[in-house]
Image (cartoon, rainbow, N blue to C red):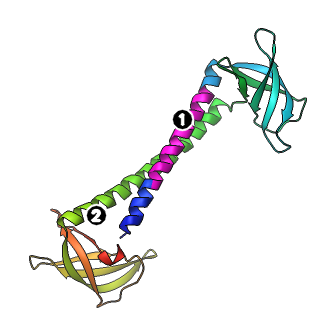
Amino acid sequence: MTNRKGLMKLTVLLSAFLLAIAVTVIVLQYRQLEYIFSGESVSAMVISIEDKNSKNAVVSYINEEGDAVEAKATLKKQASEGDKVNVIVSKRHPETVYQIPSRHMIMMFDIVFLFFEFCGWLIVIKLLRKLKKYKKLDKKGKKAIATVLSVKNTSGVLGADIEFVDDEGTKRKTVYYPESDIPEAGDKIDIVYYIKRTGKVVFMVPNEE
């Protein structure tokens, strides 16, 4: 079981992080696509760089009217003053130029990004399902005292087989995964539970809340 407050906080933070990453990537991709499909490739000269290890520079290029234009540039690799570089210029943003990665590189980045987002949202959905379970337990849950039958280690995860008697006098068995203190056989645990139509036991341990 997972602490409810921690679960809610984790869900909100993870959702906000995934949304922020998605918005950032969409904005950057929009700018890159704009330069790739509507921009013009020109030769420019590096006038200055931020520092020796920086790829950010100021370059000068000749526009369609034959005028020299100074622009901020983001380069693929480090350059020195006086170097000639090929950059992409957008008519909408003549003051900023880029050395855009190839379409193949952009596609690979998109695949990795989408996979990361997909896995992240799967985790969010899983957390939301747990929160939904807590909500149902608040509405439908009934109290009981469960007895630990045995404690076992399955693939490095400690779980305790527990048994309790429901409100109709039926013995129920399920598995409890403790958050901190490891129980021993014979220990008593207070639980809040409800029984699904399938007969599956859904429960939480209030002491871990």
Q: Residues within 10 Å of mark 2 (few under 14, many from 20)?
A: some
Which residues lie in the magenta part? 13-33
- Give the residue at the far right of this rendering: 82
Residue 126 higher or lower than 76, as above or below: below
Name the amino acid type tagged 1: Ile
Residue 62, image x and y in percent? 81, 15
- Above/below status of 191 relative to 65: below
Residue 22: x percent and y percent?
Answer: 51, 41
Q: Nearer the viewer, residue 171 or 94?
A: 94
Q: Quadrant of residue 203?
A: bottom left
Residue 168 vs 40, above or below: the answer is below
Q: Which element is circle 2 on? A: helix
Report which residue position mark 1 lands on: 26
Residue 54 in the image: x percent, y percent?
80, 42
Pick whichever of labels 2 and 1 is earlier in the sequence: 1
Farthest top residue in view: 65
The answer to which quarter of the image holds residue 145 is: bottom left
Q: Is residue 151 left or right of residue 29?
A: left
In whole angstroms, how far apart are the C-alphas of marks 2 and 1?
A: 35 Å
The 10 Å Cα crowd at callout 1, few under 14, some 14 to 19, many 20 or more, is few
Q: Image quadrant for the C terminus?
A: bottom left
115 vs 38, left or right, is left
User: Where does label 2 land, which residue?
Assistant: 134
Q: Nearer the viewer, residue 68 or 173?
A: 68
Question: Which residue is at 42% across, 79% downward?
Answer: 180
Task: Return the x and y of residue 94 as percentages of the image width and height.
Answer: 71, 20
**In which quadrant is the N terminus drawn?**
bottom left
Q: Is residue 60 above or below residue 127?
A: above
